[in-house]
Image (cartoon, coloured by chain):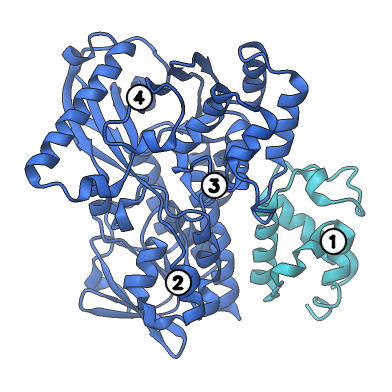
Chain colours: A blue, B cyan
Amino acid sequence: MVFTPLDKVRQKYDVVVIGSGLGGLTCANRLARAGHAVLLLEHHTQLGGLATWFKRGGHTFDVSLHGFPYGMVKTCKKYWSKEIRDSIVQLNNIVFDNPQFSLTTTFSKDDFTRILHEQFTLDRVTVDDFFNTVRAMNFYDDLGMTTRELFEKFFPGRSDVHRLLMEPITYANGSTLDEPAITYGIVFSNFMNRGVFTFEGGTDRLIGMMATDLQHNGVTLCTGAKVERIIVENGKTKGVVVGDREISASAVVSNSGITNTIDNLAGRDAFSDDFLSRFDKVVVNNSSSQVYFGIRKGEAFDDVGDLLFTSTAKEFSSEEMRRMDTKSRTFSVYYPKTRPDAPDYTVVASMNANYADWADLDEQAYGRAKEEMVERCFDDLERYIPGIRDKVDTIESATPQTFNRYTLHTEGTSFGTKFEGLDISRTIFKEVGGLFHVGSVGIIMSGWLGAINYGVIVANDVDAYVRS
Amino acid sequence: MTRDEIKDVILEIIEDIDEDAEFDGLDADKPLRDQLDLDSMDFLDIVMELRKRYQLQIPEEEYPELATLNSCVNYLEPKLKEA
């Protein structure tokens, strides 16, 4: 796809969007459809932010495709296109395997209700009560209760049940049992709606279709363009500085991380002390590590499930899950059905990770740590796909440093910020006129569905500002 | 615009959002959300479309005025009198 080189970009737009994560792309598309002139600037050569992919050894690896909730069907149709919606397909086999239980599920409310009743011997009324409680949660509800307290209230002392309910969400958005229960309830309910879905054709096809749609709607797309600074004068944003260009705009939407946006792009001088004191309480979420395995052409393996939540740790612990030597990881298994036009087998192992653990290693220790991580993933994968070592022809790995390099996220965060970031992101335009933020914040506005929907919410704010 | 015209505009916008929306038997005094399976994102779409068509700014705290078809009409009638 041909994008617009920076020197061909116009001098003035209604809106400049910085960053092309799913939130930035959706916000840009929505604003263009509403009739605004939109420029989208991305520092990387590829669009998508963390919704990304890369090619190695003849394989295409998906970094964050794993699986998203059914809500994507409606959201993609409304804010993108029917063609995009029509490529969304269900992943039927979600596998859990740990010392406390092993099971396969569709990860839907009906199937979870059955499993909690039959395998975990809980009575139906309690299970129904739990589901009704989490489904009724709103982000403006009381924050007093933590997820831990929520679980203890419904399933006291049942660490196995807590693990079943929590482990997938910890992988999905880095949350812990000490987060506000509403953040859990909203995300969990989204998945429980109908199960887990994916995009046929892979991340590259999705982002390619989105880029086509954006250009069709008149958005100017410019990659390899790193914004140096958001221009703020007299409490209002006037545009951005990118390379040797200064581009004016009535509104700037930053799809850069919220911490990056305030500390580096706009600069702290642009904000009031009161706002900064609230901002300084924002905690960025943890990062991730991944190992990618490509299977030699001609080799194959049986269907072992689409998404495997595996652990040999005795009990669930979000802290254990972030350790460098964690015994807990997911395997996203991609079969030829993922890309019918280029059938292939790949496996992506994902782990949560602390940036600090990886940041301070010297080159040698860093290389060794990566090798050990690959070996641990191989050992675990061997239990599900025997003989996998002999079938693999391509191995690659990523650490929090890798995530930091490609996304520029503070501490390589994969899931934006903890809950406090939501209010900062939602109110930034009240501090600096015309400056908006879209991106993973508050745990709720995270993941593919959360990011896209947040893009729509912010587009509405921007539209109101530009038209006023 | 007359009350009937406003009603038609609202239904037309909802139809653009959800082509499968079924208006037969719609009770104008009951919440649209329950009858048409609309969620909070859909209401945002309605707000944005009204702004685009009529330069109408609806503050967030007034979104609840759009709950039923009749409350929509009551709320929008004075605002769209000249439209």
The residue identified by callout 1 is B7
| Residue drawn at (73%, 47%) of the image | B38
Task: Provide the chain ID for the residue under circle 1.
Answer: B
- Where residue B37 sits: x, y (%)? 75, 43
Residue A374, image quadrant: top left
**Is A409 in front, or is B69?**
A409
Looking at the rendered structure, whether the residues under marks 2 and 3 are on a common chain is answered as: yes
Sort mark 2 into few (<14), some (14-19) or many (20+) by Cα contacts within 10 Å: some
The residue identified by callout 2 is A37
Secondary structure of the residue carrying tag 2 is loop
Looking at the rendered structure, whether the residues under marks 3 and 1 are on a common chain is answered as: no
- Where residue A72 sits: x, y (%)? 55, 41
**Is B56 in front, or is A133?**
A133
Secondary structure of the residue carrying tag 4 is strand
User: Does A74 sit left or right of A278 as displayed?
Assistant: right
Outermost residue toward the bottom in this view = A234
- Where residue A372 sits: x, y (%)? 17, 29
Residue A237, image quadrant: bottom left
Judge depth for marks 4 and 3 and give the one in front. Answer: 3
Say which amino acid is labelled 2.
Answer: Ala
Q: Is residue A417 above or below residue A339?
A: below
Task: Provide the chain ID for the residue under circle 2.
Answer: A
Q: What is the spatial separation of the Cα atoms under label 4 and label 1, in whole angstroms? A: 49 Å
The residue identified by callout 3 is A179
